[in-house]
Image (spheres, helix red, strand yellow):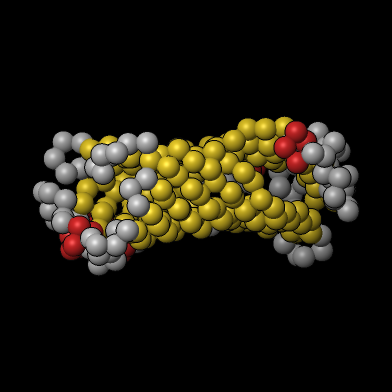
Amino acid sequence: MLPPIIFAAVLAASTAQAVTPPHDSSLLNHPDRGYRFGLTAEIGTVKALAHRIQFSNNGTMFDYVADGGQDILFPFTRLTADLDIGERHSVVLLYQPLTLRSEIQLQDELVVDNGTFAAGEALDLKYGFDFYRASWLYDLQADPSRELGLGLSLQLRNADIQFTSADGTLRRVNRDLGPVPILKLRTRQPLKGAAWWGLEVDGFYAPIKYINGSDTDVVGAIADASLRVGVPLELGGEAFLNLRYVGGGAEGTSQRYDGPGDGYVENWVHFVALSLGLSLR
């Protein structure tokens, strides 16, 4: 059974007005201001298409989808706040929780940072990769009904990856907190009637040592891309259906790692999410 908020979004979309409501009917914004606020919430489901990870050079390359319980659907939510300044500038704040938990019984021996989990052992897994992002965009289109924004994002990754034996006798944890610079593109264009479509892409690919000045040979990448179709609601609201890809990862050895392994990590993920969203502007 779908969550009640999804039913509410579908119902709201089905009763949407045929034309965009006037600016002064917004619950959040007044037409005389030189700025506008926006709040957006998405809820849906996320699926791992592919996800492989390895900790330490002598560790096992572990397939989360085939062997780690990520072959099912997981809940997906996303919260965004926007501030439009004047006609061209926008600031976007994002919170993206992305934590997948599973309980499995190992088919084969698993080595994680010099810790060995035996074949047949029950294991509790946590893959936490929540992130926070702040973005700035400049709109290249003067038409207020259209947008083609280019800009920059700064993402704060907040990784918490755990392998724990069900009896608690062995645990391996890898945590990482750090900033990531990203390029951003966002566009929104009208469809027939009052409907619209939008595309948003945040991403980068780089050998990290050429960005942070270290001599650590690490390669990293992030891609967060979405395609959505929406309709206006009353009082400045909007409802939309969104298809999103979230992927990326890193490969290399960290010089700041203090054990128990050698600091090498290889972690590549490919997720796809389908969600319904509600916005108020």
Image coordinates of residue 12 in percent, x first then y, are 20, 58
Please tell me how many numbered marks the rendered image carries. Answer: 0
Q: Quadrant of residue 141?
A: top left
Q: Nearer the viewer, residue 160 or 120?
A: 160
Q: Nearer the viewer, residue 55 or 169?
A: 55
Is residue 168 rendered to the left or right of residue 130?
A: right
Question: Which image quadrant: the N terminus?
Answer: bottom left
Is residue 198 rendered to the left or right of residue 171?
A: left
The answer to whether residue 48 of the structure is visible from this angle is no
Question: Which image quadrant: the C terminus?
Answer: bottom left
Is residue 101 rendered to the left or right of residue 22?
A: right
Q: Residue at x 21, y 36 (%)?
A: 191
Q: Nearer the viewer, residue 10 or 198?
A: 198
Image coordinates of residue 225 in percent, x first then y, are 46, 38
Image coordinates of residue 180 in percent, x first then y, are 64, 46
Q: Residue at x 77, y 65 (%)?
A: 168
Q: Residue at x 58, y 54 (%)?
A: 131
Q: Nearer the viewer, residue 110 or 225?
A: 225
Q: Residue at x 11, y 48 (%)?
A: 18
The answer to whether residue 213 of the structure is visible from this angle is yes
Q: Quadrant of residue 206?
A: top right
